[in-house]
Image: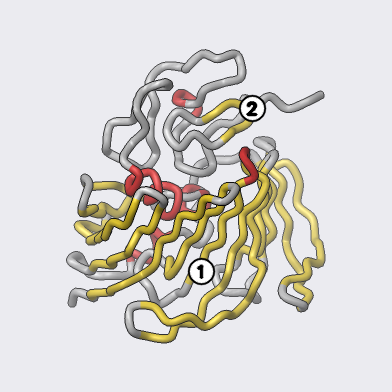
Amino acid sequence: MKQSLGPCPKCRRHVSAGADVCPFCGVSRRGLLVAAGALLVAPDAAFAQDPQPAYGAARPPEHIAVWDRVFADWRTLYALGGSAESWAKRAPGTSVSYRLDTVNGKVDIRTTLVEVGADAVSLKNEPGAVRRLSRKPYPLKLEKEEKQELEIDGKKFNCDVRSYKSGMKVWLTADIPGGVAKMAFPGETHEVVKLSEKIVAAGKERTCVVWCSTGASGGMETREWRAEGVPGLVVKWEETVGKQVTKLELTEIKEAK
């Protein structure tokens, strides 16, 4: 039976009609647009405090939409090495700045840690509002556990593989930074493709793990460079749709004491 998909009202990426939550931006099942075309009640965002647009309404500003895709992502949602715990290790006042480069021009974004709570961290976006990243994993029903060997960047790793009733599958290994090697959802795959790549960002050479996401609607491919020493983890992010490329690059880090 072919899986029904519909666009999430927040990030517009396609999600299974049976999904409990959008794995890309955190909107819960009540906010997902199912294949039948009906929006089930108002969106209940798992991360953002900004009001979410109803389906068919104007999309959020580009820098906010990108921020949600980068930081309020599926790793944060499922507590699998997401940016929330990276922020939780810092003192309030710590900030990171990025240059967002799109076909519509460039904009500088700064995110500052406001508060670390037991359930979430609060971050102030400039430009933008205060956003919250959950520190609690979204509850999932485990269907099966197994062992599987996975090859990454020419090396083989023994992984614990967990399959969930929602259709998500995750490959875990303590032998790579972050502990997560791969995640798969119906129609999309996210995986580590390079274990170590050095790039210069914010005036310093940083050793990054490179992730690649493929399979989204429209032939979208996303690459992301992550480093443990950066608040929020993200050093660089690129999303390609056809000939259109959106880039986010780290420009500054300010650690509060």
Residue behind mark 1:
225
Q: Secondary structure at mark 2?
A: strand
The answer to whether one can see residue 144 in this image is yes
Q: Position of residue 7 (x, y in %)?
A: 54, 29
The image quadrant where one finds the N terminus is: top right
- Answer with left or right where residue 120 lies relative to residue 199: left
Q: Position of residue 190 (x, y in %)?
A: 63, 55
Give the residue type that dot 1 points to. Trp
Q: Nearer the viewer, residue 119 or 20?
A: 20
Q: Position of residue 235 (x, y in %)?
A: 43, 70
Quadrant of res 255: bottom left
Residue behind mark 2:
5
Q: Nearer the viewer, residue 142 or 12?
A: 12
- Answer with left or right where residue 64 lies relative to residue 26: left
The image quadrant where one finds the C terminus is: bottom left
Q: Residue at x 27, y 54 (%)?
A: 117
Q: Residue at x 30, y 47 (%)?
A: 132
Determine crowd level at label 2: few under 14, some 14-19, many 20+ residues with C-alpha closer than 10 A: many
Q: Which mark is residue 101?
A: none
Colour scheme of the rendered structure: secondary structure
- Answer with left or right where residue 86 lies relative to residue 139: left
Image position of 82 with respect to 17: above or below: below
Q: Residue at x 63, y 76 (%)?
A: 195
Q: Secondary structure at mark 1?
A: strand
Image position of 222 with respect to 166: above or below: below
Distance, label 1 to label 2, CA atoms, is: 29 Å
